[in-house]
Structure formats: structure tokens, C-alpha cells
Amino acid sequence: MMKVGLLPAPAAPLSPYWAAYLRELGLTPEAPALSDAEALALGAQSLPGEAPTVQLALGRVLALDRVDAAVLPEWPAVRGDAWGEALTELLPRRISGLPTLLPVPERVQDLTELETQAAGLGLRVAQNPGGVRLALERVRPLAQPRAVELPLLTRASRATVAVIGPRPLLMEEVLAGGLRPALEALGLHPVFSYEVPYPEARRRAERLEGFGQMPAGERELFGAASLLAGKGAVAGLLLVSPARDGATRAALGRLAAGLHKPALLLDLDAGEREWPELEAFRDRLTLGARGRDTAPASPRAPGGAE
């Protein structure tokens, strides 16, 4: 039986499913032996020119102690996002000596397809068909998405700002942990795109021009932004991209071009705690300034009030 690592993935709704599944197969999933900050530093040393999300993922792989394979939940990719589309293929090309990287779905799209992929993973790491069938039955309840309600959009004496960005960035404390406190210190009430119920974001994205050609990550970002921008309580939108991630930056630029409310594009690098441009943006929202930030032209994404 293989020795398997499972990377932490706060942004992946199915993380508890994969952890439980590996345990049901008789495995003890190995976790990285370093803290997130240490893993990030290790990844940044190895791939200094890449986005912090990529650096963190690599650092966590490098921090696994002598495993045969590492299970990584997939990322929701945007257009032109090579890392999001093929992280487990690109990392071994850039860094030698990595364990076998096994991608798994990060969200339920179809239970049958999920269990087909889970069965393939189980046979590869445990080589016990009977055990795989039993494990799939036992963890099936964990595949059901957890019900999530739309967060409160108002807070006394504060302007509400929707914070739109990829989950692998915004849900990692070591990467984006300083953003919420910075916004609150400016007297703003931030509502993050990952807090929006995914079914609602997807339904909203289905209304957008070009929906059929949008990759999964772009649908999620555009849907959450359109939904939140349509709420009267939301004064403006902060569109957050990982530093050195041109594909996500371009996707958010396309999104900004179709909004009818003030928007600010912000690159976020690991460890940042202060963003001078946020104060001016706060003033635009609280003093009633109008207009929008410059962004590349693109098909419009609905963002008017409902």
C-alpha cells in the first residue's frame, strides 16, 4: 500500500470527503511537516516568479515527508490559466523529485462522475477493489454540498464592499489574512465572493454573455460579482488577483469592464498587510464618487441593481 499525502485545501469543499475516503481505505493521509508560512517560503524559494497560490501549493508538496503520492484538489481555472488547468502536470516539469501528484475534484458536479474518479484513485493507492466499494459507500454522505446562506450585506455605519477573487487565494489565511482587517480598519464591511452560495453564483453566471465558453473559475467569479453587484447594499467591488497571475488579473479586468458600480483591481502578494489604494477607494464609496476603474474591454457582465 502506498504512503499518500493529502494537501490542506481550505478552498476545496470536498477536502473532508477526500480525507475520510483515504482513511476508509486504510491509509493515514500524511500532512505537510511545515507550517503554511514555512511551506510558502519554501515554494517561493523554488519558484520565485510564480503567483503565491502556486508557491504555497508547491511548498506544501515539498513539505510532505517521503510519500509515494500526493493528493491535490483541483483548482477552478480562468481563461488562459495554465496552472489552474494543469497544476499536477506542470509542477513536476518545473521541480524534479516530486512525488506522484494525483488531482481530485474539488467540488461535486455529478456524484457518479465523482465516485468514478474516487474509485480510480482508490484502486491506485490501495489496490483493493472490495475496500474501494465499501469506502465509497461510507463517505457518500460527505459528497453532499453543505447548505450555505448569503451573508449579511449590511453593517451599521459602514459601506459594504464585495471582495471578488479566487478561493485558493482569499481562503488561505497565510496569503490573504490581512485583507479583511485592512478593510474593516477603513470602516468598510467586506463580503467575500467565497461566502456566496455556489448554486446562486452559478445561476447568476448563466445569465451572462459567453457563459458557455467560460471556464469554471471564471463562471464562479463572474457569477458572484454579478450577484453581489446587483444588491443595493453593495457600494462597490474590490477585485483581487494573486500577484504575478496574469490570467486571473485579465479575467478580473474583463469582469470590471462590465460593472456598473465602482470597482478596484488589486494584486495581492503573500504577507501584505497594507494597501494605500484602499483608502482612496473607500472615499469613492463613502463620499458618493462614481465612475469605474480602467479595465480591458470585454463583453458586459450584468452588474446593475436588481
Image (tube, grey):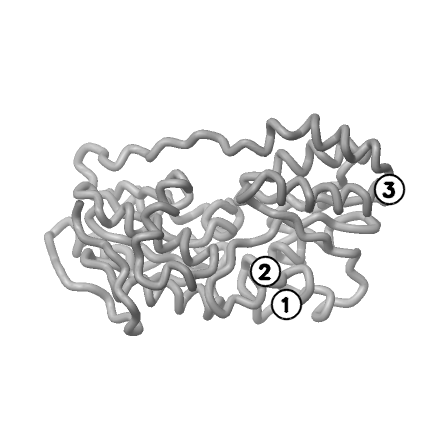
Mark before the other along the chain sequence, 3 or 1: 1
Which of the two residues, 112 or 25, is positioned nearer the viewer here? 112
Q: Earlier in the sequence, mark 3 or mark 2?
A: 2
User: Residue at (80%, 48%) from the top-left corner?
Assistant: 65
The image quadrant of residue 266 is bottom left
Q: Position of residue 31 (x, y in %)?
A: 72, 41
Look at mark 1 in the image and give the residue it sits on. Answer: 47
Q: Quarter-wise, where is residue 18 in the image? A: top right
Q: Are marks 3 and 1 in contact (CB under 8 Å)?
A: no
Q: Is residue 134 above or below residue 115?
A: above
Label 3, label 2: how many angstroms apart (C-alpha)? 31 Å
Amino acid marked by disc 3? Gln
Residue 141 vs 185, above or below: the answer is above
Tags 3 and 2 in contact by the CB under 8 Å rule?
A: no
Q: Which residue is mark 3?
A: 127
- Where disc 1 sits, the SS reads loop
Percent coordinates x, y for residue 278 in the rendering: 28, 56
SS for dot 3: loop
The answer to the question of whether label 1 and label 2 lie on touching residues, with beta carbons closer than 8 A, is yes
| Residue placed under numbered mark 2 in the picture | 54
